[in-house]
Image (spheres, rainbow, N blue to C red):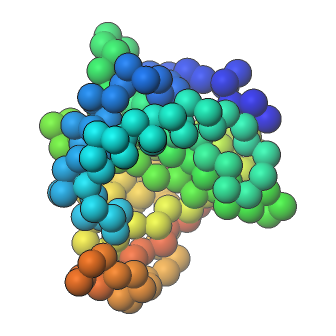
Amino acid sequence: MEITSLVPVTSGRLVLRQFDPEDLEDLYAYQGLSSVARYLYRRPHTREDCEKVIAERVSSTTWVKDGDKVALAICRHEQRRVMGEVTLTLASAHARQAEIGWMLNPEYEKRGYATEAARAVAALAFDVLGVHRLFARLDAENTDSVRVCERLGMRREAYLVENDLDGERWGSEYIYAALAHDLKR
């Protein structure tokens, strides 16, 4: 399936659209922060890293095979500025399972934007893309993302203790998941 025909996705306050090269500075504003990178088990991105990320996102437009990814910029209706992103990765085409993720510039946190964006992309996954099961993997210390999962109606299915290494720090992960009928819409 060609994703470009499905976007932009809109919700009450938001427009979720494809990234374009003009989004570089907005992307770098949060991808370059150690506070954001911490929960992704990676170092903060450089401006050059963000240029590569933008190029990948601009060229990633299909939803067919395992690993295909849709990354959408989160913007308010009235402005073009990117506040964050929400991603959907096809984990198993055969089993119709997808992973959802989100990331916000801390400047926009605590206003419900991540929940609203995730809810809109979950609806796209279930209602349009035919996903059977949607899951999220998140650092167990990322309490804001835990709350987003719970607001969506996802259930905690697993707690993976010290399953990933971020430099010197062992991180533990939660896995949350939902079937279409589980989600609060």
The residue sitting at the right extreme is 94
Where 4 sits versus 139, above or below?
above
Q: Residue at x 22, y 37 (%)?
A: 29
The answer to which image quadrant residue 135 occupies is: bottom right
Q: Is residue 96 left or right of residue 19?
A: right
Q: Is residue 175 left or right of residue 98?
A: left
Q: Position of residue 21 (x, y in %)?
A: 43, 23
The image quadrant where one finds the N terminus is top right
Q: Position of residue 60 (x, y in %)?
A: 63, 37
- Can residue 181 be seen here? no
Q: Residue at x 66, y 24 (%)?
A: 4
Q: Residue at x 48, y 72 (%)?
A: 175
Q: Position of residue 12 (x, y in %)?
A: 41, 22
Where 65 sits versus 54, above or below?
below
The residue sitting at the top extreme is 78
Q: Residue at x 40, y 48 (%)?
A: 102
The residue sitting at the front extreme is 48
Q: Is residue 178 left or right of residue 158?
A: right
- Can residue 99 be seen here? yes
Q: Is residue 3 left or right of residue 19?
A: right
Decide which of 28, 159 is in the foreground and name it.
28
Where 139 sits versus 62, above or below?
below
Q: Position of residue 49 (x, y in %)?
A: 37, 46
Query: So how many labels did they put on this image?
Result: 0
